[in-house]
Image (cartoon, rainbow, N blue to C red):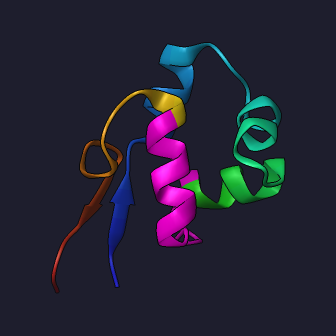
Amino acid sequence: MPLYNRLKEHRARLGVNQAELGKLAGVSRQTISLIERGDYSPSVSLALKLATICGTTVEDIFTYEDE
């Protein structure tokens, strides 16, 4: 399931590192790293939380492309 994301761009715009974003979202730095690399697809609740933190929509951060 190819789920692409622009989380790194949004995180940079906020001026926070992975550890800080993880703390804000209630997850580890490793989780944020895995999401940014595309090795982990977040739950719906985590995706919504990240979008809220970034001040945008889930669709602006995450993109699903059908194979």
Residue found 84% across the figure and 53% down from its top: 28
Above or below — where is 59 with respect to 13? below
Residue lying farthest left?
Answer: 66
Residue found 30% across the figure and 42% down from its top: 57
Percent from the top left, x then y, of residue 66? 15, 82
Residue found 17% across the figure and 86% down from its top: 67
**Quarter of the figure with residue 55:** top left
Depth check: give the residue in front, 64 or 25. Answer: 25
Depth check: give the residue in front, 48 or 14. Answer: 48
Above or below — where is 3 with respect to 37? below
Location of the N terminus (image quadrant)? bottom left
- Was residue 64 drawn as part of the magenta stretch in this picture? no
Above or below — where is 20 with respect to 31? above
Percent from the top left, x then y, of residue 51? 44, 42
Count of labels shown?
A: 0
Is residue 4 found left or right of 17 in the rendered image? Answer: left
Report the magenta residues as a range.
Answer: 36-52
Depth check: give the residue in front, 52 or 65. Answer: 52
Residue found 70% across the figure and 45% down from its top: 25
Secondary structure mostly seen in magenta is: helix
**Quarter of the figure with residue 61:** top left
Percent from the top left, x then y, of residue 62? 33, 55
- Was residue 47 drawn as part of the magenta stretch in this picture? yes
